[in-house]
Amino acid sequence: MKRLNKAKLPRHIAIIMDGNGRWARKHSLKRIAGHKKGAEAVRKVVKTSGEIGIQYLTLYAFSVENWRRPEDEINALMSLLEEFLVSELREMLDTDIRLRTIGDITKLPEQTRKILLNTIEQTSHNSGMTLNLALSYGGRDEMVEAVKKIILDKESGRIRSEEITKELFSEYLYTADIPDPDLLIRTSGEYRLSNFLLWQSAYTELCFIDILWPDFTGEYLIDIIADYQNRERRFGMISDQLP
Ligand code: FPP
């Protein structure tokens, strides 16, 4: 961690955790074994991120498209999420981590939602890193929902058309009180955003790494952050204009 410049840490890191299925195939195991190993990688990465001093870590744990997977795989993913929440509660409280979610969690099974809401509540007073799980999340769905809410507020007179700006739109998204990600990582060597944080990642630095998610570690994360710190973020300006 000595290699990192504390003054230039990404405030918000978002990760598309991809490659659990391929990891399982590579080891002649069932897909679910890949997810199980993937959940272990989640523990490691959460721990390292907290230790480094990352303020927001968003993990793409389940997309709206993932509902199309076989039922036994969906059930296994929900069970793994429940196990993770129960087993990590103590750790989250001890390390000051606050849990929250983005996505339509009303779609989750009752039991999963109950555990989730309980964990959110129990960690709500923590002020260290925010662990943000994207569950039943889709970027396009998020934007369509935002548009619907804006129309309702316009119709009821709570907002006027002239007030509809990029900033106001952002406030209608699930991520209303979270800064845009500075760094977005996708594992497994795929080069896609897959409907993840489409609006929020307009100026995000992207990193695609050819490591399957279950093999991902805190060391890889530190390497990626070190690489990020060497990039120049210009936000449309030229180098000379930057501080
Ligand atoms: C992508 O791998 C991964 C997922 C769809 C789910 C991510 C879930 C976990 C890492 C485990 C549980 C999560 C938590 C928060 C405890 P894939 O199945 O698409 O892999 P493939 O592309 O190789 O088939």
Image (cartoon, rainbow, N blue to C red):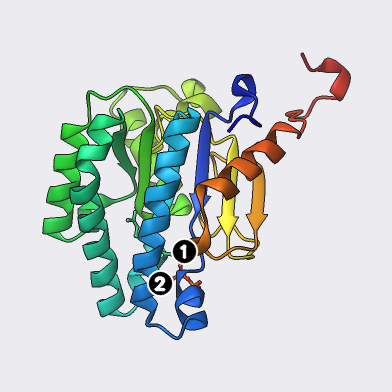
Residue appearing at x 45%, y 77% in the figure: 24
On the rendering, which quadrant does ligand 1 occupy? bottom left
**Label 2 crowding class (10 Å Cα cut-off): few <14, some 14-19, many 20+?**
many
In terms of secondary structure, where does tag 2 sit? Answer: helix
Point out the image quarter for the C terminus. top right
Residue appearing at x 45%, y 32% in the figure: 51
Quick one: label 1 or label 2, which is nearer the N terminus? 2
Q: Is residue 133 above or below residue 50?
A: below
Given residues 239 and 161, the one toward you in this image is: 239
Residue appearing at x 19%, y 40% in the figure: 119
Residue denoted by label 1: 214
Three-letter residue code for mark 2: Gly
Q: Which residue lies furthest to the top in this view?
A: 243
Residue appearing at x 47%, y 81% in the figure: 27
- Residue 117: which quarter of the image? top left
Instruction: Please indicate, yes or no, whether residue 62 appears anywhere in the rendered image.
Output: no
Residue denoted by label 2: 34
- Is the CB–ligand 1 distance for label 2 below 8 Å? yes
Three-letter residue code for mark 1: Pro
Q: Residue 39 at what x, y percent from top left?
A: 36, 59
**Label 1 crowding class (10 Å Cα cut-off): few <14, some 14-19, many 20+?**
many
Give the Cα separation between the discs numbered 1 and 2: 7 Å
Q: Residue 26 at what x, y percent from top left?
A: 52, 81
Instruction: Please indicate, yes or no, whether residue 159 appears anywhere in the rendered image.
Output: yes
In terms of secondary structure, where does tag 1 sit? Answer: helix
Q: Residue 228 at what x, y percent from top left?
A: 68, 37
Q: In this view, does 193 lie above or below 96?
A: below
- Residue 75: which quarter of the image? bottom left
> Could you tell whether 209 is left or right of 198 in the image?
right
- Is the CB–ligand 1 distance for label 1 below 8 Å? yes
